[in-house]
Every structure is written in C-alpha cells, then in structure tokens.
Amino acid sequence: MNAIDTTAVIAIESLRPKDRFKAWIAANIGDRATLLLGLIVLLLVVMAIFDAAGMTSGRFDSDYLASTLIAYVPLALLALAELVVITSGKGGIDLSIGAMVSLSGIAFGMLYQQVGLPLGVAMTLGVLIGALLGAVNGYLTAYLGFPALIATLATFYAYRSLALVISNQKPISGDAIRDLYGAAKSIEIPLIGGSLPLVPLGVFTFLLPVAVVAWFLLNRTTYGRRLYAIGTNDTAAQWAGIDTRRTRMLAYTFAGGVSGLVAVYTVAQFASARPDAGTSGAGMALPAITIAVLGGVAITGGIGRLSGVLLAALLIVWLNAAILLVVPGNDGAQVQLLALGVVLVGSALLSRTQLRRTSKRVGTVAVKPPPAKPAGSATNSDAA
C-alpha cells in the first residue's frame, strides 16, 4: 500500500458510517476485478430467481453454465490479443482478428485435411500464418504510420475476402477434421471432476497455456515493461531508448498468432474450417474489444490487466447465455447485440471516470517545498 492509499484509508475511517460506506464503494469500484466479480454474482443470483420463478426456457444450472465455456475459450483468447494491442497505445486496436481467424482456419483446414500434413505441423503453420497476418497489421501501423483503425479495417476486408476466395466460399471438412471435434468436447476434471460439471477441454489445452504465457510476457519480461511504457507515453519511451516501432509491431504479431490458435480451436469446435468462422454475424472483433475494455484496458493505452479481461469474458459469455434463456430464438440474438453495445458504452464511461479520479488523486498529492533560505544568504547564482 502506497502513501496515497494509506491516506485514503485514514480519510475513510474518519467519516460517519453512512459516508464511510459511500467512500468505500467509490474506492473499490475502481478495482475492476472486484467489480466484475460482483456483477457475475449479481447475474447468477438474478438468473437463479428467474429460473425458480419459471421465467426461463431452460434450466439455468451449473451444467448449463459449464457448457457455455466452449464459447468462452475463443472470446477470452481474442480479448487477450486485444489487451496486448490496445495496451501498446497510439490508438492501438485490431478490427481484423475475426478475419484472421477465418483465413488462418481455412489455411489450417487445407494443410491438415487436403494436403495431409501431421496435426502438429498443420497447427504450427496455422498459428504462424496468423502471426504473419498480424505482422502485416503491425508493419502498416508501426512503421508506415497508418492509424490502427484504418489499417486493421482494411486488412479485415482483405483477409475476409481471401478466406472466401481460397475456400471457394465453402467449408472444408473431412474425416481428419471431424476427428478434431474431440479437442473441443467437455471432459471431467481429474480427481475432483465427479462433483463438478463437465468442462470443455479447450479451457485447459488452449486458454490456460496462452493466459500463462501472456501473464508472464506482460509482468515478468522486459518486453512487457516496454509495452506499457510506449502505451503510456510514446515520446518518453523513445527518449528512454525503447524501439517503439518494433515493440508495437510485435504486439500485433502476437495478436495474429493468438488468432491463428483460435482458428484451430474453431475448426475443432465446428468440425469444419469455415470461411466465415470469425466474421459471421457481429464477428469476433466487436465482442473481443468489448471484453477488453470492460476488463479495464484503457483505450488510450498503457493500462490493462489479465485478470480483468478473463473475468470480463466470463461475464459476457454468461450474460449471453442468460439472455438466450429469457429471450429465446432470434430475438435473443438481437438482445445479445444490444446488451453488448450497452456494456461497451458503460465500460468506456467507467474507464473514463476511473482515469479522472486517478488524475485527481495524483494531482492532490502535496509536494513538500524546499526549506526557506536564511536571510542574507546567497545562492550560487548570486555569488556568480
């Protein structure tokens, strides 16, 4: 706890109980992980009441919640990709991740099903193709100076078109790809699985390894420190000797590699390589960006935590699942989009409020002035 936090705690304890409660809420609302946990608990309580009252089209129980985690894996992975890109600052954002999922998935399907490469080799090449697509975004943004919004929107159209053209607008399927469906199936957790619902295998084989790598990259490497530095102040990072262009390009390359991994997962999930896997409907980019911002990633860059993104992804997935039980059918899908837009606006407003509150707290920290000079004493400049 730093000096500012200690002062805040002392100030809160000196208030009346009613004012103390309000101050505690205001102080802890800034902890995004605590806020998201509270919203998840609130969602579960409300849906349990609806379920008990017979207001849902199906049972809202632990088995249903666990089954929805199959959609949690790709959304959480792409939100982690957006975390790295947005944190790099300078308007960083990647609108093309859904198109990269589609194109990398088609490439993986062709290599594995049609060319007949071994699964490990085809997966590696699929991820590398995604990383190459992300590197194109990074080069356009970091080295050529294109705004990220324009560059990734252009590559979104280009990658989506390539996926449709290469696949002849048809999904790629076959015995080899159909056998991959087991990679997305639900399994029983060893030792304690008998008392818990089945969990999709992808949570352990895809999401957890990437989450561990991303956490280590952001918190335990010099690259992570450089990434936060360029996102906070690009000019200061340059004066500190950081290669800002290379650091930013690597962020987009990482996002592309994660998109390639998600492509492999979606091929297993759908038992086919679909050219619109990441772009159909609202696509995967909008939910991933929403989750990243909801998880506390500052759209201006330099601020973002892994825990907030993972919790935000869980909240969005369970919120979508709850909406489908309350509003079934196509109407439920439209309500999901409405909720996604509301959440995006609300999370952006919350982030803006937090930044203002943080700047005010920093601005109110008093700086101790230097001691006054004795009368008649001379400074170095006076003596000169």
Image (cartoon, helix red, strand yellow):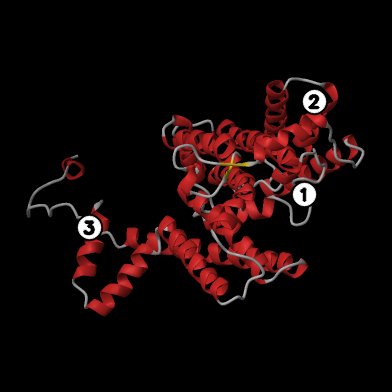
108 up-or-down from 7: above or below: above
Q: Residue at x 73, y 48 (%)?
A: 150
Report helix, strand or loop for mark 3. Answer: helix
Amino acid residing under circle 1:
Thr
- Where residue 102 sits in the image (x, y, percent)? 77, 41
Q: Nearer the viewer, residue 42 or 328?
A: 328
Q: Residues within 10 Å of mark 2 (few under 14, many from 20)?
A: some
Residue at left offset 9%, top offset 48%: 377
Relative side of 264 to 169, left or right: left
Residue 61 image position (x, y, % from top left): 55, 61
- Side of 2 where 182 appears, left or right: right
Q: Which residue is mark 2?
A: 111
Bin the neighbour count of mark 1 within 10 Å (Cα to Cα): few under 14, some 14-19, many 20 and up. Answer: many
- The label nearer to you, 1 versus 2, is 2
Residue 305 in sight in this render = no
Pinpoint residue 275: horizontal percent, then vertical percent. 82, 42
Compared with 199, 209 (above or below) is: above
